[in-house]
Image (tube, rainbow, N blue to C red):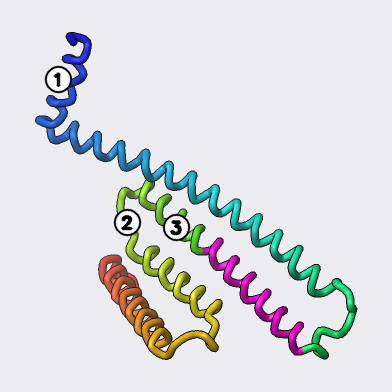
């Protein structure tokens, strides 16, 4: 029992000392941010592999698979090729979004501040990805209106952040 008294006593002393307590919280947050960075790096690597594999397999299959006919002569092949390209664009944007999230975490680790501008840009990329891969034949008008409102709100927020940063730095 005596063996546990000292760590418990130190823990309780840490609660009484605000600087030590805040330092402990900061260290914990730093560890979590680093673990998230490692996780995002893994996700980026897997997504890049998936993009490469998908491009090689799908495009190779569609371009070189028999029968070797001109793709423009077959409307079904054109539609399938278009879907494949949209899927590839979506996967590329997934990688870009993951890289932006990694930049957000890295900026937080360096400056200990969440950069609102980076978060908004990441959100704009995510909405752009949604629009690019959107199937207009299956999407309701209300969903399109919601996306338009989201884009407008993010663009307005980005403009406000740029104005505040511009005013703060005093550059023209």
Query: What is the x, y in percent for residue 64?
Result: 86, 72
In terms of sequence position, does the residue under pointer 2 or pointer 1 come before the other? Answer: 1
Point out the tag, 2 or 3, that comes first from the N-terminus.
3
Does label 3 or label 1 sit earlier along the sequence?
1
Assess whether residue 87 is covered by the magenta stretch.
yes
Q: Quadrant of the N terminus?
A: top left
Which residue is disc 2 drawn over?
A: 114
> What residue appears at the point 68 percent right and 81 percent down from the top-left corner?
82
The magenta region covers 75-96
Residue 49 placement (x, y as % from top left): 66, 55
The circle drawn on residue 143 is: none
Q: Give the residue at the far left of this rendering.
A: 16
Residue at x 39%, y 63% (from the top left corner): 118
Q: Magenta span has 37?
A: no
- What is the C-alpha distance between the residues marked 2 and 3? 11 Å
Count of numbered circles in the view: 3
Which residue was labeled with disc 1?
Answer: 9
Residue under circle 3?
101
Q: In this view, does 139 lie to the left or right of 84?
A: left
Whole-percent x, y for residue 126 in the image: 46, 70
* Quadrant of image for the C terminus: bottom left
Q: Is the magenta stretch mostly helix, strand or loop?
A: helix
State yes or no: discs 2 and 3 in contact (Cβ < 8 Å): no
Q: Which of 129 and 66 is in front in this view?
A: 66
């Amino acid at each position: 029992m005596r063996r546990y008294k000292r760590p418990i006593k130190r823990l309780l002393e840490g609660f009484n000392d605000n600087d030590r307590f805040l330092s402990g919280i900061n260290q914990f947050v730093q560890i979590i941010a680093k673990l998230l960075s490692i996780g995002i790096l893994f996700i980026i690597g897997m997504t890049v592999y998936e993009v490469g594999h998908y491009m090689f397999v799908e495009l190779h299959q569609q371009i070189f698979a028999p029968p070797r006919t001109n793709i423009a002569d077959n409307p079904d092949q054109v539609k399938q090729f278009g879907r494949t390209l949209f899927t590839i664009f979506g996967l590329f944007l997934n990688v870009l979004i993951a890289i932006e999230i990694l930049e957000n975490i890295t900026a937080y680790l360096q400056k200990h501040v969440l950069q609102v501008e980076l978060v908004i840009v990441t959100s704009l990329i995510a909405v752009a990805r949604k629009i690019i891969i959107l199937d207009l034949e299956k999407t309701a008008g209300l969903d399109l209106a919601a996306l338009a409102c989201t884009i407008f709100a993010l663009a307005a927020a980005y403009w406000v952040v740029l104005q505040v940063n511009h005013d703060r730095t005093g550059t023209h």
